[in-house]
Image (cartoon, rainbow, N blue to C red):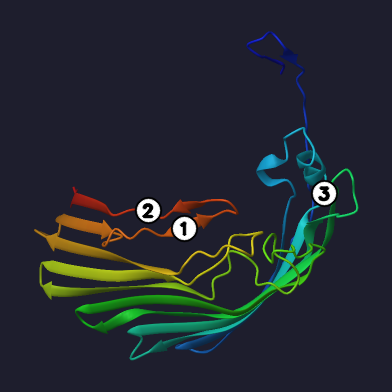
Amino acid sequence: MASTAANGTVTPGYSFSKTESLWSPRVGLLWQPSDTASYYVSYGTSYNTSGDAYQFTPSSPNQTLANTPAEKSRNLEIGGKWELFDQRLSVGTALFYSEKYNERNQDPDSVAQQFLLSGKRHAAGMEFNAAGRITPKWEMFWNHTWIPVAKISRSNQQLAASGGGAQVQGDRPGLTPRHSGSVWSTYRVFPKLRLGLGANYRSSQSPEGSRAVKAAGFVTFDAMAEYSFTEMTTLKLNVTNLTDKLYADTLYRGFYGPGQPRRVQLTLKHLF
């Protein structure tokens, strides 16, 4: 579809299409030796097409990026789950290893800004989770991800003279915090009143593609109060980001998107 500018200049229209047909095999094995324990191992592959939101932009370098083959990744995970204290508490843990083995890199010797699938990165860590009823009145939910190992193991990006610029071989990949997770707990103070308090946390991290900028870690708190008038009618108050903390959520090289500010929500539910 052509477009006409205010000065009468007509820009010709263009069309572009792209198709990706790739297999993404996955396999898993589950072993349950008893009613209270289970173990699993899984292996999977994935891919993401090149160009992302820019794949339909006709100008270079976006067009050369869109014509680059898809990146591919593989993931191995081994874990277990156990039911404890007469199945009142469920806990689980897992070890994982993820690798992107043909990451897009810009060819430094290409005048046309061609992209190569020459990069490689990996991450390894553990996941923990617990959920259950500690007492008849007290419930708890917790999950935590720990990624001590994360590295760009191969890249043709060059370190800038200032020490800043794009991430290079040996750097920790952006958007990969060492610690992240959440905890949530509720307690029935009275038969009709239940209170809840939780926290969401994430350690420091850098934006993707930048080594000179780092967003600080943060912790936000949520709270809840629920009153049941009857089995059919309930009034609930939810407050997210209780302290109205300002923190960097979505990260980019030159700017960031702040996290959600304090939000108060009051809900009246009645079952008919």
Indicate the quadrant containing the N terminus: top left, top right, bottom left or bottom right: top right
The amino acid sitting under disc 3 is: Thr
The amino acid sitting under disc 2 is: Gln
Residue occupying the point 63% across, 11% down: 6
Q: Nearer the viewer, residue 144 or 191?
A: 144
Mark 2, residue position? 260
Q: Where residue 177 appears, x then y in whole percent? A: 54, 71
Q: Nearer the viewer, residue 229 or 50?
A: 50
Quick one: SS at disc 3? loop
Cα–Cα span, label 1 and label 3: 29 Å
Task: Tell me how many marks there are.
Answer: 3
Describe residue 15's horizontal placement relative to residue 146 as left or right: right
9 is higher (above) or lower (below) than 224: above
8 is higher (above) or lower (below) than 244: above
Crowding near the residue tagged with mark 1, few <14, some 14–19, many ≥20 C-alpha atoms within 10 Å: some
The amino acid sitting under disc 1 is: Asp
Earlier-in-chain disc, 1 versus 2: 1
Mark 3, residue position? 68
Quick one: SS at disc 1? strand
Residue 76: mark in rendering:
none
Earlier-in-chain disc, 3 versus 2: 3
Mark 1, residue position? 249
Earlier-in-chain disc, 1 versus 3: 3
